[in-house]
Amino acid sequence: MVDILIVEDNKDLSSLLSDFLRAEGYTVSCADSGEKALLLFDKYGAKLMLLDVNLPGLDGFAVCRRVREQYNTPIIILTARIGREDKLSGIILGADDYIEKPFDIDILLAKIKGIFRRRLSLDIVTDGDLTVNLADMTVTKGGKALTMTAKETELLSLLMQNKGQTMSKDMLFNRIWGADSDSEPQTLTVHIKWLREKIEPDPKNPTRILTVWGKGYRYCGQEQTP
């Protein structure tokens, strides 16, 4: 998963933003259309999205709407459209901020840093007696630390953050292993098995991580049953 996905059809601006953000230590990916942005986001994810409104094909508002249907990823809209109705549209659709072009890069960087600081609290996900802390890569169950690999911890956190939603195998694999060329899709199945052995009362009859046949997996939580 990259830190920031830049969705901007102006290649010069996109390149400039990428250089500034990478200099600050962020990992960055770029898309020059709404369709490409959604493909990249669905496949690899992003911790934050910088989103232009005026895009070829699917515009920024439509991208924002689509992302908000499933995820709470922070979105900063960057646009020359400064009308009141446009600003309201962006806010109503769930954008975290709306910045007018041209903008001061230092102010943008400050806003990005602020969002990442606030989002650190979301690194801790709790459900019943189970807690995942991505900040220090630990998992506890009933107050006792569980032995987890980094990928197991990331996978469990992703499932818990999307509690009640069915996540496809492709989406889960790409979000956790997409950048690792040595990994195979079967890795996901193995890691789900390992997670169940560590967090389920009866791993052979799981009640927390359920298989949705033909689709993927769904985290249901402690209090629910299949």
Image (cartoon, rainbow, N blue to C red):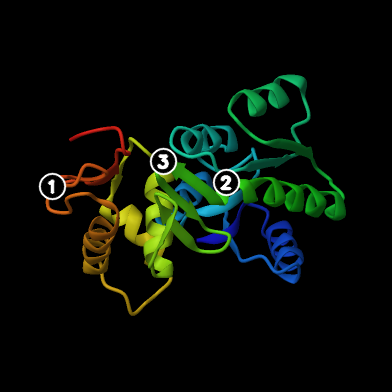
In the rendered view, does 187 fall on the left or right side of 49? Answer: left
Q: Is residue 66 visible?
A: yes
Instruction: Residue 125: give x, y in percent of width and height.
Output: 49, 46
Q: Do tag 3 and tag 1 residues touch (Cβ < 8 Å)? A: no
In the rendered view, does 24 fall on the left or right side of 28? Answer: right
Instruction: Residue 26: give x, y in percent of width and height.
Output: 66, 65
Q: Earlier in the sequence, mark 3 or mark 2?
A: 2
Q: Which residue is mark 1?
A: 205
Q: Which residue is mark 2?
A: 122
Q: Do tag 1 and tag 2 residues touch (Cβ < 8 Å)? A: no
Front-lying residue, 138 or 210: 138
How crowded pointer 2 is (Cα within 10 Å; few <14, some 14-19, many 20+) is rated as: some
- The relative height of residue 64 versus residue 16 in the rendered view (above or below) is above
Secondary element under disc 2, as helix, strand or loop, is helix
Q: Which mark is residue 108?
A: none
Instruction: Residue 87: give x, y in percent of width and height.
Output: 72, 26
How crowded pointer 3 is (Cα within 10 Å; few <14, some 14-19, many 20+) is rated as: some
Secondary element under disc 3, as helix, strand or loop, is strand
Q: Nearer the viewer, mark 1 or mark 2?
A: 1
- Between marks 1 and 2, how big is the CA–CA gap? 30 Å
- Between marks 3 and 1, how big is the CA–CA gap? 19 Å
Q: Residue at x 64, y 34 (%)?
A: 95
The amino acid type, in three-letter code, at marker 2 is: Leu
- The relative height of residue 114 versus residue 95 in the rendered view (above or below) is below
Secondary element under disc 1, as helix, strand or loop, is loop
